[in-house]
Image (cartoon, rainbow, N blue to C red):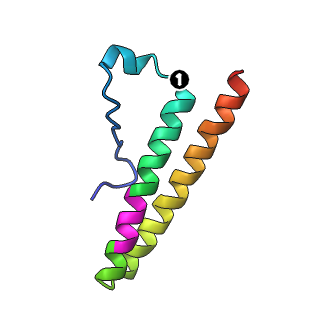
Amino acid sequence: MPDAGTEILVYTGESPEEENKMKESTKDQLKGKAHEVQGTVKEKAGQVTNNRELEAEGRQEKFGGKIQKKIGQVEKVLEK
């Protein structure tokens, strides 16, 4: 499983040149959503396997993803 320093890549279906044009706010929102999903999977896996450490790690990653997504939303508002 990825650790806190692992970067999550989100495939958008665009070429690397087009993806580089993506605004930072949009990137933050996508990365935040990816962390939310990954955190939910870890949390559920921890519940199923009765692994409290994995469950807590999942909750933490999910919460971090929500914060990152919210930061992206705020950045988007401030860009206007």
Residue 11, placed above or below residue 46: above
Q: Position of residue 28 (x, y in %)?
A: 52, 37
Mark 1 Cα within 10 Å, few/some/many (few <14, many 20+)? few
Q: Residue at x 31, y 34 (%)?
A: 11
Residue 56, placed above or below residue 11: below
Q: Quadrant of the C terminus?
A: top right
Q: Which residues are magenta?
A: 38-44
- Number of labels in the image equals 1
Q: Quadrant of the N terminus?
A: bottom left
Magenta span: predominant SS is helix
Q: Position of residue 65 (x, y in %)?
A: 51, 52
Q: Position of residue 58 (x, y in %)?
A: 42, 66
Three-letter code, disc 1: Lys
Q: Position of residue 19 (x, y in %)?
A: 38, 21
Closer-to-camera residue (48/52): 48
Question: What residue does disc 1 label?
Answer: 23
Give the image quarter of residue 13.
top left
Q: Residue at x 63, y 41 (%)?
A: 71
Give the image quarter of residue 18.
top left
